[in-house]
Image (cartoon, rainbow, N blue to C red):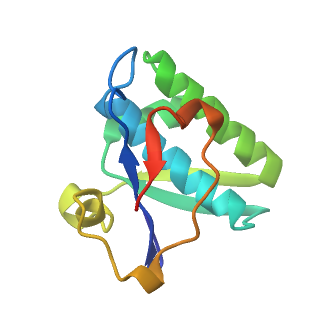
């Protein structure tokens, strides 16, 4: 993810894929990690824009549900954070070529001094995602 000139990324643990955890789930988790970063950063009482290059995930968040139950769990966690912080998140599509986080997702990270503070991952994600080292 990219927030201003700062960045963060995570790594996948072995065995993450399965039981509804697929690329769509990963794209939804990217949104969740962005929201979690904002929440833990103290953002509240605001309307925020999150850009994604996955229209399916944007649609799922806009509708509040997905056919994928793992994505639904993600949406529930995001909505809980939104309610706790009184923040509205608007997801907007951006082309992959214009997605500022695209290079970071391929391992081309920014300068270490610009890395965002790590967040506390939800317990449900510990087996599948780890902080980038």
From the viewer's side, name the closer residue of 95 and 39.
39
Residue 114, how many percent across, how many down?
A: 45, 82
Residue 28, how many percent across, how many down?
A: 44, 38
Q: Is residue 63 left or right of residue 52?
A: right
Q: Identify the residue at the far left of this view.
A: 97
Residue 89 appears in view:
yes
Q: Is residue 122 left or right of residue 12?
A: right
| Residue pictured at 31% horizontal, 57% vertical | 94
Residue 88, how many percent across, how many down?
A: 67, 52
| Residue pictured at 43% horizontal, 34% vertical | 59
Q: Is residue 15 left or right of residue 8?
A: left
Quadrant the N terminus occupies: bottom left
User: Number of labelled discs?
Assistant: 0
| Residue pictured at 41% horizontal, 58% vertical | 132
Quadrant the C terminus occupies: bottom left
Q: Quadrant of residue 74?
A: top right
Residue 54, how many percent across, how many down?
A: 32, 43
| Residue pictured at 48% horizontal, 27% vertical | 71
Image: 91 above or below 37: above
Residue 58 appears in view:
no
Image: 93 above or below 74: below
Q: Quadrant of residue 22?
A: top left
């Amino acid at each position: 993810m990219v927030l201003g000139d700062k960045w963060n990324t995570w790594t996948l643990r072995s065995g993450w894929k399965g039981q509804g955890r697929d690329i769509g789930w990963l794209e939804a988790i990217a949104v969740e990690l962005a929201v979690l970063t904002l929440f833990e950063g103290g953002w509240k009482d605001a309307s925020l824009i999150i850009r994604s290059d996955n229209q399916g995930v944007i649609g799922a968040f806009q509708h509040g549900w997905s056919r994928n139950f793992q994505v639904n769990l993600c949406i529930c966690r995001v909505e809980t954070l939104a309610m706790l912080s009184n923040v509205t998140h608007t997801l907007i599509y951006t082309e992959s070529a214009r997605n500022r986080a695209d290079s970071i997702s391929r391992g081309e990270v920014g300068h270490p001094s610009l890395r965002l503070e790590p967040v506390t991952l939800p317990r449900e994600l510990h087996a599948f995602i780890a902080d980038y080292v």
